[in-house]
Amino acid sequence: MKKTVLVSGGAGYIGSHVTVELLQAGYEVVVADNMSNCDSTCFEGVRKITGRDDLKLNIVDFCDKARVEELFSEYKMDALIHFAAFKAVGESVADPLKYYGNNLESFVNVIGAAHRHGLHNILFSSSATVYGQVEDLPVTEKTPRLPATSPYGNTKQICEDILRDCTSAYKDIKGIALRYFNPIGAHPSALIGELPRGVPNNLVPFITQTAVGKRECLSIFGNDYPTPDGTCLRDYIDIVDLAKAHVAAVSRMLDGKMEADYEIFNVGTGRPVSVQELVDTFEKVNGLKLNCKIAPRRDGDVTAIWADTALAGEKLGWKATRELSDTLKSAWEWEKHIAGK
Ligand code: WQD
């Protein structure tokens, strides 16, 4: 009997890539999303990639307790992956109540429903942002979390603590938090990818939108950091590699392989890449020249962060495999696809 996984926020960038990998790994998937931050492009792409025209998109706002209860009464599910959250750092600073309200209430609701309906395995979409501005790099899962640098990051820290405390109090619940570094790229089919609403906050969609002519010029936020080329260092993880890490984590839970009630894993490549290096690689592999300029530093940016990925390798049997060049090619193919080119 196939195991069923609920993917909340399943129509979004990461949720859609994870749904593809779960289906292709033999799981059944319940896709639920309130469509507040995406349209149905990626969901339709998931159906095409997997050939699952029967896959249903359940419209669910996870802040709506009654609707969440309905969903859990309609489907018997064995695990859930919670993506449904707002994720724009800058917006969270401008409107913290929107972030604390949505990101915390939705998670409390979904854990409560899981507990009431005998769903024992919860995977939380966390973020490297929970580490804050760390000095000692690369970060391991034992690196202490510093005070969050934004309300968005704080909601990730608080949700990790909610999951930790629930797995400790409710013996039937097990939890894993995956701390993503910087997810980038798109599925090789170019049928799903990142579709930011409005002006992209993140580097790679801004690059691809500049390349396709949707944005005038890419601003590189600061080249006076204490790094080899003066630009910030990040750990850019390919979205398909990231999605496969979720399948490995769900399997660990469902196959009873967990060694504690609550586990945390870094999901990165372990390879720091600078903004300038990423821009140069994008230009080289796609044979184009980007219009870009050096701009002042962006508030809240950390100089550098990248992952120690040993634990995910050892316990999940997972590691990132895709080359940055292939990832940046996939990002460009996706941008051209949505631009109809
Ligand atoms: C990366 C680097 C920028 C845009 C955030 C969240 C994280 C995750 C990913 C949400 C930085 C530089 C960017 C631009 C630039 N979650 N940059 N010009 O800030 O590392 O992480 O997004 O999606 O939790 O914290 O990602 O892509 O915004 O920035 O120079 O137009 O690119 O200064 O050094 P970040 P990012």
Image (tube, rainbow, N blue to C red):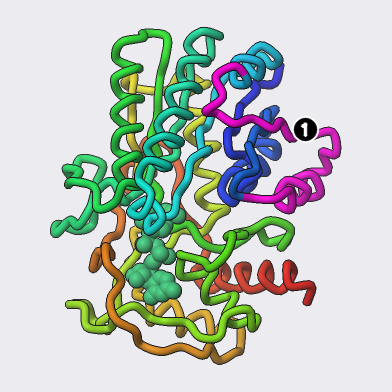
Query: Where residue 167 sits: x, y (%)?
Result: 35, 17
The image shows residue 275, relative to residue 171, as above or below, that is below
Judge left or right: residue 314 versus residue 68.
left
Tell me which residue sits at (30%, 10%) in the image: 169
Residue at position x 26%, y 42% in the image: 141
Residue at image position (54%, 55%) is 239
Give me the residue at 52% from left, 80% from top.
282
- Choose top left, top right, bottom left or bottom right for residue 337: bottom right
User: In the rendered view, does 151 fall on the left or right side of 250?
Assistant: left
Secondary structure beneath disc 1?
A: loop
In depth, the one of 31 and 328 nearer the eye is 31
Q: Quadrant of residue 143?
A: top left
Which amino acid type corresponds to the residue marked 1 in the rendered image? Lys
Please state the horizontal and vertical placement of residue 6, each as a whole percent of the image: 61, 27
Q: Is residue 143 left or right of residue 282?
A: left
- State which region is magenta: 38-66
* Picture quarter with the N terminus: top right
Magenta residue check for 63:
yes
Residue 181 seen in the current view: no
Residue linked to disc 1? 56
Q: Quadrant of ligand 1?
A: bottom left
In what quadrant of the picture does the C terminus appear? bottom right
Place of residue 183 in the rendered image (x, y in percent of width and height, measured from the top left):
47, 57
Q: For the residue carrying disc 1, how many other residues have a C-alpha within 10 Å: few (<14), some (14-19), or many (20+)? A: few
User: Relative to the observer, which residue lies in front, 105 or 77?
Assistant: 105
The answer to whether 57 is drawn above or below residue 326 in the figure is: above
Q: Is residue 111 above or below residue 130?
A: above
Give the percent coordinates (x, y) of residue 171: 36, 8
* Residue 95 belongs to magenta span: no
**Can residue 145 be seen?**
yes
Q: Quadrant of residue 311?
A: top left
| Left or right, residue 185 beside residue 133 | right
